[in-house]
Image: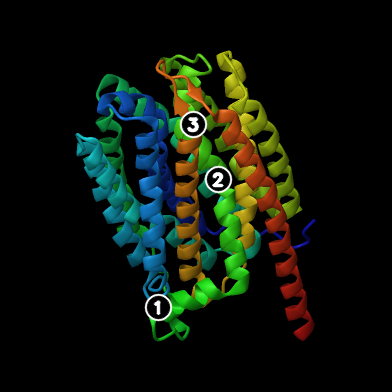
């Protein structure tokens, strides 16, 4: 249990938390929309599951590369201006996706979108760490992570509806138009976030990046982050095709799965954040790991499945995923010094994207499609996810112990 009080948000903090969730919604939706559209994009462009996996992972790899490139400069600018720059590029890349007519142009568009969109999450994390106290971050992480659910409740069903009544290009064009609203809110309402500029900066951006990457306690967290992303990047890109071709779910029923799962997630993501602040990070994280491992085994071995049963499995699986990610993000937000928050989060985001891209490629190699579309290899993917989940739980426990020791030493010195 934690004995620290959990102060209420100020009105401006509530606005910032809502804005961060709004922006996260747009970025997550842009990435996630590829998964349910996979069953449409593959036949429309006449591409294989491996090519589709490449399109998914291309975003991740370019996002990871951009994270490393941005890390050296991430603490040298007002975070608001940095956010505006990358968000504008993200909107342009998403518009390009909506205009792509061939696989090469779609691949190029996903790379450009990743270059900009992949950095946004790290800037949001740095802003949250700057503006919220440690014992508020579980709640704000819960709010921001609820954007993932909102993208399912609002974004994915609408995206599937638009693609069913238009083409697969339509959802990307809608996301780009929707994103312009977020850009205007950033420009007009978000205050500058520049207190870190008062702290003496390292002379060289390259040295700043080098010292961030080489800091042992940071490097340990980066490795753990890469493992934690494995589950989503290995399972979700093939979720719609697996549901339709293996589980016997109608393409028209996919929006229902995302809608119900998302509604449930919107409820329990903020709840997980509040519990994390009150109970502690590690108990919530370990419960989430146990739920994830159990449901992944069950999910990847399913045969033809009734729609209500599949929805229930999805809901429980996402409960496990969020019960790991929210406390983990809260935990590592305490690691970086103020002058390194931007670079730490940029590198951490880069590692997350690169690890996820590698996971997508591995999954694409393990999964094959039969002539009728039936996917072979999902149980093997599930075993890989379980293995990385267990390892990441062990590493997270070690990170938490190291943070506790560091805090105790600081308290003794004081």
Q: Nearer the viewer, mark 3 or mark 2?
A: 3
340 lies above or below 308 = below
Foreground: 41 or 190? 41
For this rendering, which residue is in front, 217 or 301?
301
Q: Position of residue 48 (x, y in %)?
A: 35, 30
Q: Position of residue 169 (x, y in %)?
A: 25, 32
> Which residue in the protein does label 1 denote?
206
Residue 76 figure quarter: bottom left
Residue 31 image position (x, y, % from top left): 39, 42
Q: Which residue is mark 2?
A: 230
Which residue is nearer to you in this view: 104 or 117? Answer: 104
Q: Position of residue 314 (x, y in %)?
A: 58, 28
**Helix or strand or loop: what does disc 1 sit on?**
helix
> Which residue in the structure is indicated by mark 3?
367
Residue appearing at x 46%, y 42% in the figure: 360
Tell me the quadrant of the picture where the N terminus can be found.
Answer: bottom right
Q: Residues within 10 Å of mark 3 (few under 14, many from 20)?
A: some
Q: Quadrant of residue 2?
A: bottom right
Residue displayed at 22% across by 41% down: 105
Up/down of 234 relative to 332, above or below: above
Q: Is residue 303 above or below residue 262?
A: above
Q: CA distance from mark 1 to mark 3?
A: 40 Å
Helix, strand, or loop for circle 3? loop
Question: Could you tell which of marks 1 and 2 lies nearer the N-terminus?
Answer: 1
- Of badges 1 and 3, nearer the viewer stands 3
Q: Earlier in the sequence, mark 1 or mark 3?
A: 1
What is the tally of numbered marks visible in this picture? 3
């Amino acid at each position: 249990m934690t004995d620290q009080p959990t102060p209420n948000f100020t009105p401006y903090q509530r606005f910032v938390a809502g804005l961060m969730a709004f922006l996260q919604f747009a970025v997550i939706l842009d990435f996630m929309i590829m998964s349910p559209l996979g069953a449409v994009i593959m036949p429309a462009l006449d591409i294989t599951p491996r090519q589709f996996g490449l399109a998914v992972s291309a975003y991740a790899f370019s996002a990871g590369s951009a994270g490393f490139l941005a890390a050296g400069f991430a603490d040298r600018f007002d975070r608001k201006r940095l956010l505006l720059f990358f968000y504008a590029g993200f909107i342009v890349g998403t518009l390009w996706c909506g205009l792509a007519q061939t696989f090469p142009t779609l691949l190029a568009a996903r790379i450009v979108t990743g270059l900009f969109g992949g950095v946004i999450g790290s800037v949001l994390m740095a802003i949250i760490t700057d503006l919220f106290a440690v014992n508020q971050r579980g709640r704000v992480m819960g709010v921001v992570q609820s954007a993932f659910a909102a993208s399912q409740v609002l974004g994915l069903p609408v995206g599937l509806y638009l693609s069913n009544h238009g083409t697969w290009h339509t959802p990307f064009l809608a996301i780009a138009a929707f994103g312009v609203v977020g850009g205007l809110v950033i420009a007009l309402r978000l205050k500058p976030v520049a207190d870190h500029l008062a702290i003496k900066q390292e002379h060289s951006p390259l040295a700043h990046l080098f010292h961030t990457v080489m800091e042992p306690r940071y490097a340990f967290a980066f490795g753990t982050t890469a493992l934690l992303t494995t589950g989503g990047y290995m399972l979700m890109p093939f979720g719609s095709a697996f549901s339709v071709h293996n589980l016997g779910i109608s393409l028209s029923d996919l929006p229902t799965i995302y809608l119900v799962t998302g509604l449930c997630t919107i409820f329990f993501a903020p709840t997980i954040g509040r519990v994390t602040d009150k109970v502690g990070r590690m108990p919530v994280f370990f419960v989430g790991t146990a739920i994830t491992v159990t449901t992944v085994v069950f999910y990847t071995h399913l045969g033809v499945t009734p729609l209500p049963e599949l929805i229930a499995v999805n809901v429980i699986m996402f409960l496990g995923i969020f019960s790991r990610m929210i406390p983990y993000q809260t935990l590592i937000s305490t690691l970086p010094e103020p002058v390194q928050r931007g670079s730490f989060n940029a590198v951490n985001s880069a590692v997350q994207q690169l690890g996820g891209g590698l996971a997508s490629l591995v999954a694409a190699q393990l999964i094959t499609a039969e002539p009728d579309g039936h996917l072979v290899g999902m149980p093997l993917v599930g075993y890989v996810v379980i293995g990385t989940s267990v390892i990441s739980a062990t590493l997270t426990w070690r990170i938490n112990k190291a943070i506790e020791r560091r805090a105790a030493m600081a308290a003794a010195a004081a």
